[in-house]
Image (cartoon, rainbow, N blue to C red):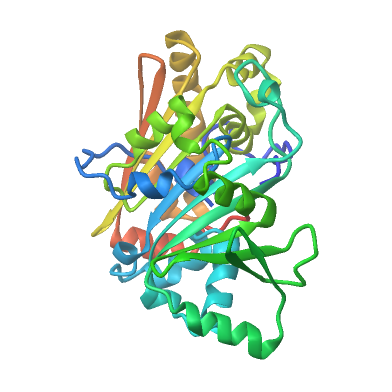
């Protein structure tokens, strides 16, 4: 996800386009809502434990639940991470139907060219590139995939006994790979991060469970929602810059952004869409200021959308922004009719 350029037409508040962010998901930062969180987690700790320790964003989507929604087939091309869509197409070619055999996905982004200092609180640096790794949970035919690669003479390699299948030539720096962890789990992404995932499995590297603060936030978000997302300080700054580029014109507001810590997003789908976004700020005062900026942004964006996208304008009118302690909570919901109209307007389109 690349930082957006300043423009007089951009809103000082939340827009409806990207956040990468898959993801998952400036879309989710752009809409907002607080809903009672179910008590039961959806992604198992054993799956979370597979991921490397140092990541910038972690996301999850319950595709089995989402596919039961009448409007999901039209939404998925706009919402799902582009790299997962590539994986779906490639998986289908191997004789594994992603629509019936993939129930859940989870993904992580690892920013490139950043250090622990520039990623953390107090920096104004944002990611300008990243590698990704993800898992698909379902029921897979490993023999079918192996036979397809052998017949097509496509490149494969072996790491710690796992066969890595290449999307492309298998030698390009941007090539994606996937491998079957077992019959119920497939991992996909850039090779270097996939190899770290394998190293975590064999105990050669620390996993995400060792990242105490980030793992605790994942547990907070992982409460049964259809889609959820957690970001570190660097990706939180990037989201704010994308959604509110003019904020950088105000010195005090720009300092506020450098003190941002994390964000959590929960989206529940049923007879519509319910969304809750929490931005974790550096202090209570910062949260109060950010809340005021967000409220002003919603008003401005609503004015912009009234003519070309009245359903979006109506949605923005329903958003509630509430500072509480060091957090800002944003809340709204959409009906099925609103979802259908917003999808027609390509509201949820974004690039990963």
**Would residue 34 appear left or right of 237 to someone viewing this image?**
left
Front-most of 218 and 277? 218
The answer to whether any part of residue 240 appears in the image is yes
**Would residue 279 appear left or right of 9 to someone viewing this image?**
left
**Would residue 136 appear left or right of 178 to someone viewing this image?**
left
The answer to whether any part of residue 314 appears in the image is no
State the residue at coordinates (29%, 50%): 42
Image coordinates of residue 103 in percent, x first then y, are 36, 66
Above or below, comparing residue 259 to residue 209 in the picture: above
Above or below, comparing residue 246 to residue 57 in the picture: above
Image coordinates of residue 278 in percent, x first then y, are 40, 30
State the residue at coordinates (36%, 69%): 71
State the residue at coordinates (41%, 39%): 265
Image coordinates of residue 80 in percent, x first then y, are 50, 60
Quarter in which the C terminus is drawn: bottom right
Front-most of 212 and 71? 212
Residue 85, quarter of the rendered image: bottom right
Front-most of 332 and 94? 94
**Would residue 55 appear left or right of 7 to someone viewing this image?**
left
């Amino acid at each position: 996800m690349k930082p957006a350029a300043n423009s007089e037409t951009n809103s000082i508040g939340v827009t409806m386009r990207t956040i990468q962010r898959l993801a998952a998901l400036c879309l989710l930062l752009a809409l907002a809502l607080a809903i009672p969180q179910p008590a039961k987690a959806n992604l198992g700790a054993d799956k979370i434990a597979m991921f490397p320790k140092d990541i910038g964003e972690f996301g999850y989507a319950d595709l089995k639940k989402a596919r039961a929604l009448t409007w999901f087939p039209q939404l998925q091309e706009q919402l799902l991470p582009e790299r997962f869509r590539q994986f779906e197409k490639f998986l289908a070619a191997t004789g594994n139907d992603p629509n019936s055999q993939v129930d859940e996905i989870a993904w992580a982004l690892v920013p490139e060219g950043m250090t622990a200092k520039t990623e953390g609180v107090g920096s104004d640096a944002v990611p300008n590139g990243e590698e990704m790794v993800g898992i698909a949970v379902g029921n897979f035919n490993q023999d079918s995939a192996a036979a397809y690669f052998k017949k097509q003479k496509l490149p494969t390699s072996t790491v710690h006994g796992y066969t890595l299948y290449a999307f492309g030539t298998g030698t390009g720096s941007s090539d994606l790979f996937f491998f079957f962890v077992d019959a119920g789990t497939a991992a996909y992404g850039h090779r270097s991060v996939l190899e770290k995932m394998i190293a975590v499995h064999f105990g050669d590297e620390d996993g995400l469970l060792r990242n105490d603060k980030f793992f605790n936030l994942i547990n907070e978000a992982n409460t049964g929602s259809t889609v959820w997302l957690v970001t570190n300080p660097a990706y939180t700054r990037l989201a704010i810059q994308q959604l509110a580029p003019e904020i950088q014109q105000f010195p005090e507001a720009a300092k506020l952004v450098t003190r941002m810590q994390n964000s959590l997003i929960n989206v529940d789908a049923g007879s519509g869409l319910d969304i809750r976004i929490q931005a974790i700020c550096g202090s209570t005062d910062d949260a109060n200021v950010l809340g005021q900026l967000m409220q002003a942004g919603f008003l401005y964006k609503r004015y912009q959308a009234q003519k070309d996208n009245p359903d979006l304008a109506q949605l923005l009118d329903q958003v509630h922004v509430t500072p509480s302690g060091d957090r800002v909570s944003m809340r709204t919901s959409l009906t099925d009719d609103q979802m259908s109209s917003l999808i027609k307007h390509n509201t949820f389109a974004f690039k990963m």
